[in-house]
C-alpha cells in the first residue's frame, strides 16, 4: 500500500499543471482572453459613467510645465499633446512615446481617471497582435513595505481576472510571464489616494523593481507627485502631462447636448448668458473642472433641477460653494431620478440612501482607504481584533453544540449516553480549543515570513487545538488518579482530537480572515485532465488516512473515557473504516480543489459574483468540516457500543453513526472551517453594521444600485466612490447633527406674572 501510494504521488506530481512553465501558445491565449475581459469591463464602466454619451469632454492634455517632474527630453521623445475626445489619436500619441511611459498629473477633479479609462479603451480598440494589453488598476491596495511592485501586479491580475490563473488552459506561469514579457501595460490610477508616506515608496518601487522598458501609465495629483519626485526621483523614461482647463463654452455645449430638447434644454440659456457676461466668475471657474461638469450633468441635465440657480451670486459667491452644492445635490438627484423612472421600486429611499452612503464614506475615511472591499468589512467592527473573533467562534461552537444536544433529546437522534455533564465538558473543551486555535492562527498570520495555510502553520494550530481541548480532562485525571494518567491522556488518547482538527484545517486552511476571497465554481471545464488527478487524490488520501486511523484506533483505545479495550476493534474492520473515511476525506479534498480551480474565461469578476463564489465555497467547506471532524472517533464509539457486525457493511455503519453524531460533534468542525473563509466574517460584520443602522441589510444590491446610478465606480470586486471629493464631502456630513437628533432650542420656563 505504501508503494502504491508512492507511485500515485509521483504520477500526480509529474502531471501537476502547477509545475513547469507556460508555453508560447498558452501565453497568446492568455493575452487574448485578458484583452477581451479588460475591454468588456471598461466599456461597461464607460457606459455607466456616460463617457461617450453624447461624447467625451474635449480636454487637451500636454506636457506639464512644472520643472523637474519629467525625465530627459532625449528619453521621453517629442512633446505630447492630444485631446481625449479622440481616443484613437490618444492611443497613437501614447504609442509614439519611445518607452511608452506616461504620468498624467492634475489637480483634484481634473479628469485623471477619465483619461486613464479613455486611454485604456483607445489602446484596446487600436491594439495589434503583439501590442501589450492595457490593464487599469487602482493603486489604493499597494503597500510597497509588504510586497514588490511585480508581486502586487501579479496578485491584482489574479484577483481581478481569475481566468488567467487557470493552469490547465494557460499554464502555471501565465501571469508572471505576461508581466515579464511586457505583454501587460499597467495603467495605475490614484497614487495620491495612498497615504502620503507611501507616495515616495511607491515611486521608488516602480523605478527599482520594474524594468526601465516596462510600459507604464501613472496618474496622480500634481502637488503629491511633485513632492514625491523630490525624494524618489522622476519615473524613469516617462513623459509627464497635465490637462488644460475646460473652456466654459465646451462645458456648456456638452451639457446642452446631454439634455433632452424641450423646456429643460432651454434652462441652460440663462446660465450660458451669465457665463458670457462673467467669464471669470464662480460658474466659469467651477465648470473648468471636468468633475464639476459631470456633477452638473447629473444634477441638472439628467434631473429636474434648474441650472440657472448657479448664477445666484448670493447663494454661490465662490466656485467652492458651487462645488459643495453639486456634491450635496448629487445623491438625492440621482435617487429621485431612479424613483421617477421606476416608480414601483421603493427599495432605497433617497434619505436612507444618503445616510448609508455617508456611513460608507466615513468608514472608508476611518480605514484610510478609498477601496470598499467586502471581504475586509469586518475591520469596521470589533471583529478586527483577534480576541473578538476567537470569542465569537468559541461562543458559536458552544451554542451550536448545545443546540445539537437539544435537537437529539427532542428527536431521539444521536448518542443516548451523553449526559448533561458530558455535554458541558465537551462544549467547554471545544470552545477553549476554538479560542486557542484562532488566537494562534492570528499570531502566526501577523508574522511577516509565515505563509497562511502552510503545512507547518496548520500542524501547529492543530496541536494547539488538541492541547487546549484535552487540558481540562487531563487536569481532572491528574487530580483524581495520577499525573501519569493525565500525561497519557494528552499524549495518546486526546491526539484523536488533534487528528480531527488537522483534517479540518488541512481542508479549509488557517482560521484567519483571508487576504482575498475564494473563487471558482462547479463545472466540467478541463474535466479530462482533472479527473485522473482527482481520483489519485481520493485513492492516495484513502490509503494514508486508513493507515493513520488504524494505528490511532489501536493505540488510543485503552485511554478512552468509555473504557474500550485495545483489541475491541477488529483489525480488518479498522482498515475498512479507515479506507472508507479516507475515501470521504479525499473526495472532499478533490471537490474543493476542483471548485477553486474552475473559472470561466468569459466571466467578469465583480463584487456580487465574488460574494456568490465565496459563499458557495464557504458553505461547502463548512459542511466538509462538520463531516470530517466527526470521522476519526466513530469506530471507537461503535466499538464501545459493541457494534461491528459481520453482516453489515462499514459504509452503512459509518453513515448511520455519522448522522447520529453530527449534531454534537459537527459544530466544532463547522465553525473551524468557516473561520478560514471570507464570507462568514463579511456576513457577521454586515449584520452588526445593519443592526446599528449604518448599512442596509441587503448591502450588495444597494452597492450595485449606487454603481448603476454613477455614485460608485467598480474595479474588479472593489467599489470606490465616483470621486474622492464626493467621499470626503459625505464623510464630513457624517459628523453633522442629524435633523432628527439635533438638539431642540430650550423653551423658556418663565411665566408672565399678572
Image (cartoon, grey):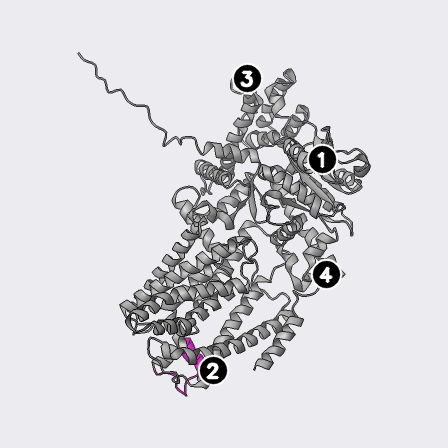
Where residue 690 appears, x then y in whole percent? 41, 45
Residue at image point 44% right, 61% down: 672
Badge 3 crowding class, 10 Å Cα cut-off, few under 14, some 14 to 19, many 20 or more, is: few
Q: Mark 3 points at which residue?
A: 313
Task: Using the numbered discs, state the Cα–Cα distance from disc 3 to disc 1 in whole angstroms.
Answer: 33 Å
The mark nearer the N terminus, 4 or 3, is 4
Q: Are marks 4 and 3 in contact (CB under 8 Å)?
A: no
Q: Earlier in the sequence, mark 3 or mark 1?
A: 1
Q: Nearer the viewer, residue 343 or 730?
A: 730
**Magenta residues, as a range?**
642-655
Residue nearest the observer in this picture, 662 or 323: 662
- For the residues marked 2 and 4, what is the alpha-carbon distance in whole angstroms? 44 Å
For the residues carrying marks 2 and 3, which lies nearer the camera in this image?
2
Above-or-below relation of 272 to 719: above
| Label 1: few (<14), some (14–19) or many (≥20) C-alpha neighbours in 10 Å | many
Q: Where is residue 741 in the image (x, y as percent from the top left)?
A: 36, 32
Where residue 563 sits, quadrant-wise, is bottom left
Image side of residue 131 versus residue 341, left or right = right
| Rendered image: mark on residue 84 | 1
* Mark drawn on residue 576: 2
Q: Mark 4 points at which residue?
A: 26
Amino acid at each position: 500500500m505504501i508503494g502504491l501510494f508512492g507511485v500515485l504521488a509521483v504520477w500526480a506530481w509529474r502531471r501537476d499543471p502547477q509545475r513547469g512553465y507556460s508555453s508560447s501558445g498558452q501565453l497568446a491565449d492568455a493575452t487574448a482572453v485578458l484583452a477581451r475581459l479588460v475591454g468588456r469591463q471598461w466599456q461597461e464602466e464607460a457606459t455607466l459613467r456616460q463617457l461617450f454619451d453624447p461624447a467625451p469632454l474635449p480636454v487637451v492634455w500636454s506636457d506639464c510645465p512644472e520643472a523637474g517632474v519629467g525625465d530627459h527630453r532625449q528619453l521621453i521623445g517629442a512633446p505630447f499633446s492630444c485631446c481625449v475626445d479622440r481616443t484613437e489619436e490618444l492611443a497613437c500619441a501614447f504609442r509614439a512615446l519611445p518607452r511608452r511611459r506616461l504620468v498624467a498629473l492634475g489637480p483634484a477633479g481634473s479628469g485623471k481617471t477619465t483619461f486613464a479609462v479613455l486611454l485604456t479603451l483607445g489602446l484596446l480598440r487600436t491594439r495589434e497582435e503583439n501590442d501589450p494589453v492595457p490593464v487599469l488598476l487602482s493603486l489604493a491596495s499597494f503597500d510597497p513595505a509588504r510586497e514588490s511592485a511585480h508581486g502586487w501586479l501579479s496578485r491584482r491580475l489574479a484577483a481581478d481576472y481569475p481566468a488567467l490563473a487557470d493552469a490547465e488552459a494557460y499554464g502555471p506561469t501565465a501571469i508572471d510571464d505576461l508581466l515579464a514579457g511586457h505583454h501587460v501595460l499597467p495603467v495605475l490610477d490614484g497614487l495620491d489616494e495612498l497615504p502620503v508616506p507611501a507616495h515616495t515608496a511607491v515611486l521608488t518601487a516602480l523605478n527599482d523593481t520594474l524594468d526601465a522598458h516596462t510600459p507604464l501609465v501613472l496618474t496622480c495629483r500634481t502637488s503629491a507627485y511633485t513632492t514625491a519626485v523630490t525624494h524618489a526621483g522622476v519615473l524613469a523614461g516617462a513623459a509627464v502631462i497635465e490637462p488644460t482647463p475646460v473652456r466654459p463654452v465646451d462645458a456648456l455645449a456638452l451639457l446642452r447636448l446631454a439634455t433632452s430638447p424641450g423646456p429643460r434644454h432651454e434652462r441652460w440659456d440663462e446660465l450660458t448668458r451669465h457665463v458670457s457676461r462673467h467669464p471669470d466668475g464662480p460658474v466659469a471657474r467651477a465648470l473648468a473642472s471636468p468633475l464639476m461638469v459631470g456633477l452638473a450633468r447629473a444634477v441638472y441635465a439628467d434631473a429636474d433641477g434648474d441650472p440657472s440657480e448657479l448664477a445666484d451670486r448670493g447663494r454661490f459667491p465662490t466656485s467652492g460653494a458651487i462645488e459643495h452644492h453639486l456634491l450635496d445635490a448629487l445623491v438625492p438627484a440621482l435617487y429621485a431620478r431612479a424613483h421617477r423612472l421606476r416608480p414601483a421600486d421603493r427599495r432605497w429611499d433617497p434619505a436612507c440612501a444618503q445616510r448609508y452612503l455617508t456611513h460608507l464614506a466615513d468608514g472608508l475615511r476611518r480605514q484610510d482607504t478609498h477601496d470598499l472591499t467586502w471581504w475586509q468589512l469586518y475591520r469596521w467592527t470589533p471583529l478586527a481584533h483577534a480576541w473578538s473573533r476567537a470569542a465569537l467562534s468559541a461562543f458559536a461552537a458552544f451554542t451550536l453544540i448545545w443546540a445539537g444536544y437539544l435537537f437529539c433529546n427532542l428527536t431521539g437522534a444521536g448518542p443516548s449516553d451523553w449526559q448533561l455533564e458530558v455535554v458541558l465538558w465537551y462544549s467547554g473543551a471545544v470552545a477553549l480549543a476554538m479560542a486557542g486555535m484562532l488566537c494562534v492562527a492570528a499570531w502566526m498570520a501577523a508574522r511577516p515570513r509565515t505563509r497562511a495555510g502552510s503545512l507547518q502553520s496548520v500542524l501547529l494550530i492543530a496541536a494547539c487545538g488538541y492541547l487546549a481541548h484535552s487540558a481540562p480532562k487531563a487536569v481532572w485525571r491528574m487530580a483524581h488518579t495520577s499525573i501519569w494518567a493525565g500525561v497519557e491522556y494528552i499524549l495518546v488518547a486526546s491526539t484523536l482530537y488533534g487528528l480531527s482538527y488537522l483534517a479540518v484545517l488541512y481542508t479549509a486552511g488557517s482560521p484567519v480572515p483571508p487576504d482575498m476571497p475564494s473563487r471558482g465554481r462547479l463545472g466540467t471545464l478541463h474535466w479530462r485532465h482533472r479527473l485522473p488527478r482527482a481520483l489519485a487524490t481520493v485513492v492516495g488520501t484513502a490509503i494514508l488516512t486508513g493507515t493513520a486511523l488504524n494505528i490511532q484506533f489501536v493505540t488510543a483505545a485503552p485511554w478512552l473515557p468509555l473504557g474500550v479495550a485495545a483489541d475491541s476493534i477488529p483489525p480488518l474492520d479498522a482498515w475498512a473504516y479507515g479506507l472508507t473515511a479516507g475515501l470521504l476525506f479525499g473526495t472532499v479534498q478533490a471537490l474543493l480543489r476542483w471548485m477553486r480551480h474552475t473559472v470561466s474565461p468569459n466571466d467578469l469578476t465583480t463584487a456580487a459574483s465574488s460574494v456568490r463564489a465565496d459563499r458557495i465555497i464557504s458553505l461547502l467547506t463548512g459542511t466538509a468540516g462538520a463531516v470530517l471532524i466527526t470521522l476519526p472517533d466513530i469506530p471507537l464509539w461503535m466499538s464501545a457500543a459493541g457494534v461491528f457486525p459481520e453482516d453489515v457493511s462499514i459504509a452503512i455503519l459509518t453513515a448511520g453513526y455519522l448522522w447520529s453524531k453530527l449534531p454534537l460533534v459537527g459544530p466544532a468542525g463547522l465553525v473551524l472551517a468557516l473561520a478560514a473563509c471570507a464570507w462568514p466574517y463579511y456576513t457577521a460584520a454586515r449584520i452588526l453594521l445593519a443592526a446599528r443602522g449604518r448599512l442596509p441589510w441587503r448591502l450588495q444590491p444597494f452597492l450595485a444600485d449606487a454603481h448603476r446610478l454613477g455614485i460608485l465606480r467598480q474595479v474588479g470586486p472593489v467599489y470606490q466612490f465616483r470621486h474622492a471629493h464626493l467621499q470626503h464631502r459625505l464623510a464630513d456630513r457624517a459628523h453633522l447633527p442629524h435633523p432628527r437628533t439635533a438638539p431642540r432650542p430650550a423653551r423658556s420656563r418663565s411665566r408672565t406674572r399678572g
